[in-house]
Amino acid sequence: MARLREFDEDRALDAAVDCFWSRGYEATSVRDLAREMGIGGASLYNAFGGKRALFVRVLERYANRSTRERIARLEAGHRPSEAIRAFLAEVIDRSLKDRDCKGCLLVNSALDVAPHDAGLGRAVTAYLEEIRAFFRRNVEAAIEAGETPRGTDAEALSIHLLGVLMGMRVLARTGARRHTLEAVVRPALDLLGSPQ
Amino acid sequence: MARLREFDEDRALDAAVDCFWSRGYEATSVRDLAREMGIGGASLYNAFGGKRALFVRVLERYANRSTRERIARLEAGHRPSEAIRAFLAEVIDRSLKDRDCKGCLLVNSALDVAPHDAGLGRAVTAYLEEIRAFFRRNVEAAIEAGETPRGTDAEALSIHLLGVLMGMRVLARTGARRHTLEAVVRPALDLLGSPQ
DNA sequence: TGAATTTTGGTGCAATCGCTCCAGAATTAC
DNA sequence: GTAATTCTGGAGCGATTGCACCAAAATTCA
């Protein structure tokens, strides 16, 4: 009973992800977004509501396509401790390939927008908590499987792993090399137990 | 042979530090700065050259008054491994008191401006490297003093400590509680050897 | 086909951006 | 005192910001 949308919402959303990811929230203008998404300003407001509302959708899409996809894939194909190892190794590899050092949209947002917008802050925190839950789940399973020492505190180690991941993301953003990123992570992986 | 400056440059610089610190580089306008510094726009440009040039001065002042002061004070009053412990403990304490979660200006800048401005990026990296040098120096001394296990790789551990510090700063920015920040740090401190 | 509804590109608004210019005030050298 | 020099507040530059509005285009239901 109305005119059909001419653009593909998912494709447009992907373009918006790239836009916010490489420029940050504040530095990205609605005109940048519209141009990159291949739509007019009116369509953007009509379809997504505005800059902030679009960013909420972007965070959700990023979490789905980047974080959750990786977690599901690695958790399905690896033993618990190896899933964590592979997760961090993959982040290192991607960070090194990431020429313009975009880093992780969630981490960037945690420092950029979260402190100035309580709502977005809660969203970012929830996504980071999903990553920690992945760590925690697999540390527990690794202990159960005998891969990780019995006395290990899974809760504490999962927090440590999240912190190490955040730190690596920050240093990667400054252009750190592989040996630096690996040195950040290695002691945390040692706590998981020596890989077979 | 000319009119004297009416404002105190150091006081104005401190105000500029607070401004950039709490709002970030992009989100801080020259008008914000001038108002908070208690000077006119023309004076700001006359004395500091512009927004970016002022930010360079701000980074330097922050490094002097925050990072370097802390390093010098703790290094003078503690045994090597205790200096590192006290450094991280102090960061945790200040992060928890920091109601508006400003975090660390250097870390915020590492994610905000460094990737989009090579010059500022190098400056930020250099300041972070000073912190790592503090870690490295004291890990080596701690090994020498028998506080830290002999086999420890001081270079690698100093990088790990820097990464853990960055990670803690990110999580603190999202409003993390004490037990979270301490869980991030504790495994790294364990590598320093048990405190006497 | 005509009414209803939504999307579309374009235009434009009020506000703000970093920055510049200017006239006047203040200070020192002469 | 006079000339020279610098600092000061204020006004204003062109550009850009997020967003609103509009008429035309497109589509479905009647």
Image (cartoon, coloured by chain):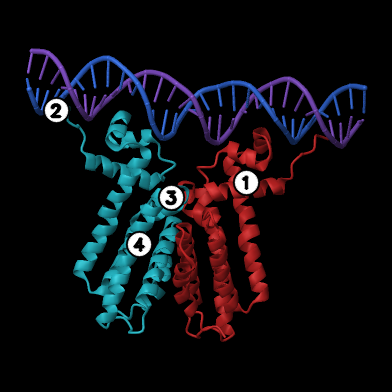
Chain colours: A cyan, B red, C purple, D blue
Taking the spot 66% from the left edge, 42% from the top edge, the residue there is B37
Residue A103 seen from this side:
no
How far apart are the alpha carbons under marks 2 and 4? Answer: 42 Å
Q: Earlier in the sequence, mark 2 or mark 4?
A: 2
Q: Amino acid at mark 3?
A: Ala
First reached walking from the N terminus: tag 2 or tag 3: 2
Q: Nearer the viewer, residue B167 or B53?
A: B167
Circles 1 and 2: CB atoms closer than 8 Å? no
| Distance from Cα at disc 1 to Cα at disc 4 | 34 Å
Give me the chain letter of mark 3.
A
Circle 3 or circle 4, nearest the eye: 3
Q: Mark 4 — residue?
A: A129
Quick check: do tags 2 and 3 share a chain? Answer: yes
Q: Is residue D6 left or right of residue A95?
A: right
Amino acid, disc 4: Glu
SS for dot 1: helix
- Identify the residue position indicated by label 1 in the image: B16
Report how far apart the C-alphas of labels 2 and 3 lie in the structure. Answer: 39 Å
Disc 1 chain ID: B
For disc 4, the chain is A
Residue B152 appears at what percent x and percent y? 48, 81
Q: Position of residue A132 (x, y in %)?
A: 34, 65
Q: What residue appears at the point 57 percent right and 43 percent down from the top-left corner?
A: B52
Q: Circle 2 is placed at which residue position?
A: A1
Left or right, residue A83 beside residue B109: left
Q: Is residue A3 left or right of residue B178?
A: left
Image quarter hosting the C terminus of chain A: bottom left
